[in-house]
Amino acid sequence: MNVILDNVYCVGTLNPNLRIFDIEMCTEHGTSYNSYLVCGTNETAIIDANHEAFAGEWLAGIEGVLNGKEPSYLILNHTEPDHSSSLDACLAQYPSITVVCSASAAINIKNITNRQDLAIQVVKNGDSIDLGGLTLEFYSAPFLHWPDSMFTWLPEHQIAFTCDFLGTHYCEPRIFDRTLSYHDAFMTSFEAYYQAIMSPFAPWVRKGLAILDDLEPKIVATSHGPVLTKGSSLEKCIDLYREWSVEQPSSPERIALFYCSAYGYTQALAEHIAVGISTALPEAKVSLYDLVGANLAHLGTELNRSTAFLIGSPTVNKAALPTVWNLLAHIDAINIVKRPVALFGSYGWSGEALPQLAAHLTTLKAKVFDTQLSVRFAPSEADLAAAEEFGKEFALSLLA
Ligand code: FEO
């Protein structure tokens, strides 16, 4: 248990050993399932629940603060099971508790618990609950990161409880950002989290930021990672969300070339393709990225922000390289639809990488350029000239 401010406690749990969240997201530094207690003079609310694997520890932490007193409310800002799968255990311990959530969250939790008899208080934007000296106000914040999500605001302490929004899959024993031991690792995880969880919902991220701009919180108490405080990381984290979610102008074109290259052959193709693109579209912003050893979460952000992109991969063991697939794992599948993409690469014995990548990108509904540039071993002068021409043709196809 950690004291956040007077009568506000963090009763979350730590999962430092988690390495994969939601089946597919790598969590190199684990995560936490933050939950909070807000204790008014009349009533007490729990804000956000917990993962069922940690339900016992979570409820013991609550009991350690309440010492037999019954909480009146469980505020569920969001119902993904990392925050709601402990609901049955909570109801067993506090059978008279009222679950407070949005209308769509109410539907979800009936299906998550398979119970229709839950005491649920549905709240909408602007509703509030008076706990006695402390007030909870509710702000609709859909798609952050499911349609059900909302923020809870504690005006007396200027704390915003935002659940996933501004969260991070990151775990240290100390809960406040100002006490972190490995701040750089936190910031890397913060970006990876944004990219994996929030980036598909950029328009709603901007709306969430507008809510916080109006509220001017001193503390943002998320449900994953450190509690963000003004004067420490809060301003920086908000600025980064603002930067990452900014609406991208469709002009000029932002064209990103990503490549892996063992002996410089695919790299040479990438460089000549870039020249061809810049020749055809002098106004375009053309960026080359070597994937080897790169921060793939960061490059995934660049890919998702591009107006068109290219992937260069050799073929090893009849496949594209794992690094290339790992980059593609960061693709925002919602916004990639119809995005122009072209493929190129050098190969030795066989060249399966490009058709495999084309099939995958077609499944994602990206607009895959008909022509693929494939060269056996070292590109000749003629191959490099062809690479420039390939870049020009792809660039001009963007104008069609
Ligand atoms: Fe942390 Fe969308 O759940």
Image (tube, grey):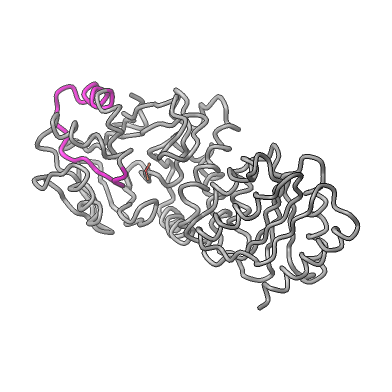
Q: 119 and 232: which one is in front?
A: 119
Residue 74 falls within the magenta-colored stretch:
yes
- Left of 314 or right of it: where is 326? left
Q: Quadrant of ligand 1?
A: top left
The quadrant of the picture occupied by the N terminus is top left
Q: 264 and 124: which one is in front?
A: 264
- Which residue is located at x 26 percent, y 28 percent? 55
- Which residue is located at x 57 percent, y 31 percent? 183
Position in image of residue 194 (x %, y %): 50, 47
Q: 267 and 95: which one is in front?
A: 267
Q: Vertical placement of 380 versus 389: above or below?
A: above
Position in image of residue 18 (x %, y %): 43, 29
The image quarter containing residue 44 is top left
Residue 375 falls within the magenta-colored stretch:
no
- Which residue is located at x 55 percent, y 48 percent? 330
- Left of 265 or right of it: where is 35? left
Q: What range is drawn magenta here?
A: 57-80
The image quarter containing residue 395 is bottom right
Position in image of residue 94 (x %, y %): 13, 32
Q: 72 and 77: which one is in front?
A: 77
- Which residue is located at x 30 percent, y 34 percent? 50
Position in image of residue 335 (x %, y %): 51, 61
Q: Vertical placement of 279 versus 237: above or below?
A: below
Q: Vertical placement of 212 versus 66: above or below?
A: below
- Residue lying at the far bottom of the rendered structure: 400
